[in-house]
Image: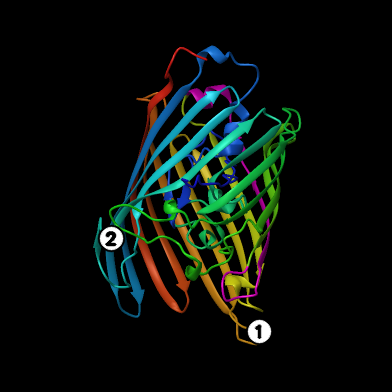
Amino acid sequence: MNRFTLATGLSLLLTSTALPQSYSLQGRATSRTPQTCLEISRFLGSGEDWLVYPTVDLSFGTQFQLTDQQFRPSGHSTSLVNTSDLTTIFRFAPRLIIYSDLTLDQITPPAQGKNSWLQSEGVFSSTLFLQYSNQFVTLGTGQFTPNFGIANNLAPGIFGGDFVSDYSFSDQLGVFAALDFGKEQIGRHILNGSLFTVDRSALSNSLFTRQGRTTASSGGPGNSGSLDSFSIAYNGIDVPVCSLPILQYQLGFISQAAPQGSTARQQGYVAGLAATIPINRSAIATAANRYSAIQPLLEYAHFDQWSSVNGATADFFTVGLEYFRGDWDLNASTTLRKTTALPGQAAAHDLLAQATISYQLYGYQTGGGTGQISAGWSYSKDQGVDSNTFAIQLSLSWDIIARYQLRKGW
């Protein structure tokens, strides 16, 4: 009997759709908007005609990033990486979809000081879930990343997601549910949770460059083979402040089962806050492409039994500030990471600081897609290794098919 993969897609889209934004994918940013299950739920239901179903949507995004990294006191590496996504949405009924995302990305990063040119690239499934939603209740099952933290999506810039990706727990199998109390007057208020385990199915492998199928011996938090890990979060999105829907926040908790050979259950707590504050939003400024806004971000995450080691802890504190004006985006952020491997051991203090400038090449009015070019710098102190990194990034995306009807309705 074929094993159908189960999981949840509870990472929220927590930014205004009118503004350019970057989202981290395995430590690199991508201009692709991650349209996850809670975001999709806003558009399902509301009494649509069954005769227009089933339909399919297909979109493609690709990104090239040229990186030059200089290590202290010596060492240097240059790399070119392509990250691409093919996203498909099958709409079987007004409230029922299958969402999938196939990703091409670098599977094995090069060793420190080694150059890499489009090497070790492989294709894998990053998201696959079946979802029902009536705009109040969302239920689903598929392949997922649990909803934990907003900095995973909102930390700005090319390098803003490098450290916070430590607690973006992708490649899970499970089930999810959410209650959406959204109203225009108060914003969306979503209580959501999931049960999951680390994906050990064939989807944990990759094509072309093989990363190997995950097994029990692979270890890691949540790799128990049973649905005994869980997350729960409360999110506010577009919450009005002074009559403007600018505030977004999350309070979240995650508990991941101990893997084989360990008794330590990793537990994490997160609190994040972001606001998109318009500076010049008049109709004249918008028409003249001079709309401007700032977006501050704060997030703190704490973990006990970090990496499923008894007594180990980890703390992350992220601060970011982003300025938008027309097609331009200027941002800076920093993440402090403190980890203790064993009780009584001295803590390791790591630091990431980054700045990025981006320009929107074209928007959805041109060819049904977006384009963006970015240049960025970061300084990191990571496990005792100091480095300065410079990067240029080109991101392009297109809507290939939109609501194509597969047959003449049910």
279, 344: nearer the viewer = 344
Of marks 2 and 1, the one in the foreground:
1
Amino acid type for the residue under numbered disc 2: Ser
Mark 2 element type: strand
Where residue 407 appears, as percent x and y from the top left, is: 43, 16
Q: Is residue 36 left or right of residue 384?
A: right
Amino acid type for the residue under numbered disc 1: Pro
In this rendering, does residue 363 appear at all?
no
- The residue that appears at 65% across and 61% down in the rendered structure is 300
Mark 2 vs 1: CB contact within 8 A: no
Position of 122 relative to 128 (above/below):
below
351, 81: nearer the viewer = 81
Where residue 271 appears, as percent x and y from the top left, is: 69, 56
Q: Mark 1 = which residue?
A: 343
Where residue 58 appears, as percent x and y from the top left, is: 40, 30
Question: Residues in magenta?
Answer: 258-287
In this rendering, does residue 136 appear at all?
yes
Q: Mark 2 = which residue?
A: 79
Q: Is residue 365 left or right of residue 9?
A: left
Q: Is residue 273 magenta?
A: yes
Q: Is residue 84 magenta?
A: no
Name which quarter of the figure residue 404 lies in.
top left
Q: CA distance from mark 2 to mark 1?
A: 38 Å
Mark 1 element type: loop
Label 2 neighbourhood size at 10 Å, few (<14), some (14-19), many (20+)? some
